[in-house]
C-alpha cells in the first residue's frame, strides 16, 4: 500500500513547533514573543496541573541533541544550520520517502 501524497508532504507537529520557535527567535530584541520563550514563572503549580510543560519538552529535545539553549538560539540566525538541526531533531528523512 502506497502512502497518500498529502501524508508524505505533511510536516510533523514537532517540526512546525521548531519552525515557529525559529521565527520567534529571529524577531527584534524587544518582541514579547521572544521574551515569552525565556519566561520562567515562579511559584507552585496548582493541584491537577501537568508537570510536563511545553518549555520542558523543548528543553528535553534540545538536550537529546546534545546542544544547549544558547547554542540553538545562535543557530536560529543561520537558515542552513537550522534546517540541519530540524532534520536531526525530527528525523523527517526516511528510506522510503524521497
Image: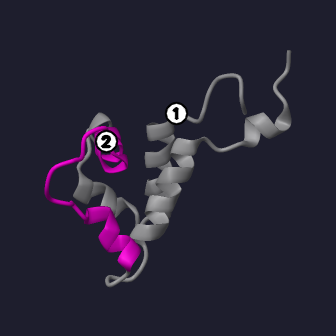
Q: Which residue is mark 1?
A: 91
- Dot 1: few (<14), some (14–19), or many (≥20) neighbours within 10 Å? few
- Give percent across and percent down for residue 14: 51, 43
| Residue placed furthest toward the front | 47
- Give percent across and percent down for residue 15: 54, 46
- Dot 2: few (<14), some (14–19), or many (≥20) neighbours within 10 Å? few
The image shows residue 54, relative to residue 98, as above or below, that is below
Which one is in front, 92 or 10?
Answer: 10
For image coordinates 23% across by 59% down, the residue present is 70
Which one is in front, 15 or 72?
Answer: 15
Measured in 3D between alpha carbons, the distance from the residue under mark 1 to the one under mark 2, in whole angstroms, is 31 Å
State which quadrant residue 28 falls in.
bottom left
What SS does tag 2 mark?
loop
Front disc: 1 or 2: 2
The label shown at residue 49 is 2
Q: Report the span colored magenta.
A: 32-61
For image coordinates 75% across by 35% down, the residue present is 8
For image coordinates 50% across by 38% down, the residue present is 90
Q: Is residue 34 magenta?
A: yes
Amino acid at each position: 500500500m502506497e502512502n497518500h501524497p498529502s501524508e508524505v508532504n505533511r510536516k510533523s507537529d514537532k517540526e512546525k513547533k521548531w519552525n515557529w520557535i525559529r521565527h520567534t527567535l529571529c524577531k527584534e530584541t524587544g518582541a514579547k514573543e521572544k521574551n515569552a520563550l525565556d519566561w520562567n514563572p515562579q511559584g507552585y503549580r496548582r493541584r491537577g496541573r501537568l508537570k510536563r510543560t511545553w518549555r520542558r519538552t523543548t528543553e528535553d529535545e534540545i538536550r537529546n541533541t546534545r546542544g544547549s539553549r544558547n547554542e540553538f538560539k545562535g543557530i536560529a540566525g543561520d537558515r542552513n544550520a537550522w534546517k540541519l538541526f530540524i532534520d536531526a531533531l525530527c528525523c523527517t528523512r526516511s528510506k522510503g520517502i524521497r
